[in-house]
Image (spheres, rainbow, N blue to C red):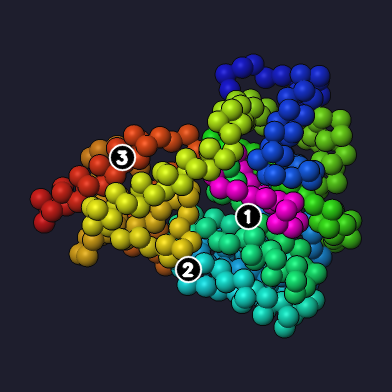
Amino acid sequence: MRRPMINHRGAAFVNLQNRVVARLQQVFDTKNDLVILASSGTGGLESAIVNLLSPGDRVLACVAGAFGERFGQIAAAFGAQVERLVFPSGAGIEPARVAEKLRAAPETRAVLVTHNETSTGVLHPVQQIARAVRENSNALVVVDAVSSLGATPVATDAWGLDVVITASQKALMSPPGVAIVAIGERAWRACETARLPRFYLDWRDYRKWLAQGQTPATPAVSIYFALDAALDLILREGLAAVYARHERLAELTRTRARSLGYELFADPRYASPSVTALLPPAGREASHLIRLARDEMGVEFAGGQGELKGKIIRVAHLGYVSEREIQDALNVLAHALEMESVEV
């Protein structure tokens, strides 16, 4: 990323973008077009809404945590008629209930699904959800894969996912600043008839410029440099090995945390390979343990969001992370328990 900026209308950037896009397609497991936006992952989610929908379109938002709720809020902000299918925090989205909702509302235009719900540490069964959508409606399957892509398989084409959105800063091991969207043919057809306002996020412009190896507006060139290097590492290790490593790190986190007295918040059947949510031992406050880890030992853990604020501790184990670092992190959580006991 310390490399000097390059002309984003020149041959060097064309080569860079073409190389990055081709290798991202391997991670997305798709032959579909990819657009790369200079934005956060939220910008990628918003781009899906404005390129696929018209005012008043019916949308089913599958909600089992803060990010599923947020996806639905984005659609509602643009005038979509959003029905929320809500599951308890820590539980997985049930494909049968998705199918039931769609049979009752066949005019549903899109189904919004968060693959990996980082607020609860749950990986939802997107393959089965997509099958339920396809078998019971003509709705588009729109997937937030911001914290799953690169950490666990996302078979975009084989699973029939119309749109998959991710971002640079999670398992793709780069700084924030880029959203990446894979767009299938059904989604492109919807894009041509969608009537929500769009300019900067208009996929059609990105597709036109992509044919020239460029972007319609100034790209985040330094993030491209980072993605290029990160994709080197990912593909050199091999996707199967990358996914297996994330599973090992997740299992290490869960096993060690339980041995310390923490409980797993998520249903183990849907435990995430990216992040684990922990309930502290009885009588201990999650927010206090997080504060001790940060202030006394310089290690940052995430807390809960919304209704889970102050109740859980979230441990990330995705991207450029090793077993040793996870062990060190869990040692800090163990020490935080000891320090809190001394304070009491």
Q: Residue 336 or 318: which is nearer the viewer?
A: 318
Residue drawn at (63%, 46%) of the image: 166
Placement of the N terminus among the 4 image quadrants: top right
Q: Which residue range is magenta in the image?
A: 151-170
Q: Name the image quarter holding residue 113.
A: bottom right
Disc 1 target residue: 144
| First along the sequence among labels 2 and 1 | 2
Res. 112 image quadrant: bottom right
The image quadrant that residue 163 belongs to is bottom right
Q: Which residue is mark 2?
A: 91
Using residue 308 as the reference point, say whether residue 85 is left or right of it: right
Per the image, label 3 sits on a secondary structure element best described as helix
Name which residue type carries label 3: Gln
Label 2 is placed on what type of residue?
Ala
Estimate the x, y position of residue 316 in percent, counting from the top left. 43, 46
Distance CA(mark 2)–CA(mark 1): 17 Å
Residue 327 seen in the figure: yes
What secondary structure is marked by label 1? strand
Q: Is residue 154 magenta?
A: yes
Please say if 298 is above or below 275.
Answer: above
State the image coordinates of residue 64 (x, y, percent, origin top left): 52, 67
Question: Which residue bears the numbered disc 3?
Answer: 327
Lower sequence index among marks 3 and 1: 1
